[in-house]
Image: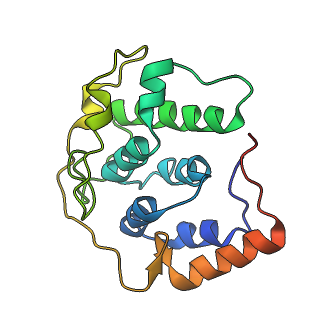
Amino acid sequence: MMLSKNDPVRRWLEQATPEFRHLFVAGWESEAAAVVFDWVIRQPDCEKATALMAYLLSSPVFLAEHGSPEQDDASEQANYSLLTEIEKRYLTGFYQQQSVGFDPSAAFPAKIDLTEGYKDIVPVQPIPEEMFVPVAGKELIEPEGWENGMPADVYRAWTEYIESEGWKRLPD
């Protein structure tokens, strides 16, 4: 599943700076994260920190514990595809932009440790250590008036769009 060209979120992301896309990934709260994160991580100007954050927010612990998703679960398939794509690009140096910072062990203003759930598992598919290394750079703060990782007007347009268009969820 891909973001429609008519989707207000996609239209906003297309003109957003890499820094705003980073804040978007940090603030996005929806079950379809794989769909929107996939668009962001494929952009040539995607920040390395943004890709790392999208990776860790997409629960690579599942990848580590199980290796591959259930064949009949489209949501798991989309998430698996996202995780493997980010990992491949990250490890091969695709993400060259490094002005934004991200520390996986102290993420966001709340300083959440996104590395914690991986220490006690015996992985079927190990997560490369590089995926837990902080990316040096400036810390960004979400501007006032943003909702769900985007300007409030974009968020309102998106909610109206999904209500009127019957935005498709990833199939179960």
Q: Residue furthest right?
A: 165
Q: Is residue 114 above or below residue 39?
A: above
Image position, residue 105 (x, y; %): 21, 45
| Residue 3 in sight | yes
**Figure quadrant of residue 140:** bottom left
Query: Quarter of the image containing the C terminus?
Result: top right
How is this picture coloured? rainbow
Q: Residue at x 26, y 54 (%)?
A: 107
Q: Residue at x 48, y 48 (%)?
A: 41
Image position, residue 157 (x, y; %): 66, 80
Q: Residue furthest front?
A: 120
Q: Nearer the viewer, residue 30 or 136?
A: 30
Residue 36 lies left or right of residue 20; in this view the side is right
Q: Residue at x 26, y 59 (%)?
A: 100
Image position, residue 26 (x, y; %): 39, 60
Residue 136 lies left or right of residue 171; in this view the side is left
Image position, residue 40 (x, y; %): 51, 54
Q: Residue at x 52, y 83 (%)?
A: 152
How many marks on residues? Answer: 0
| Residue 95 in sight | no
Residue 37 lies left or right of residue 19; in this view the side is right
**Figure quadrant of residue 17:** bottom left
Q: Is residue 127 above or below residue 125?
A: below
**Figure quadrant of residue 68:** top right
Q: Is residue 89 above or below residue 43?
A: above
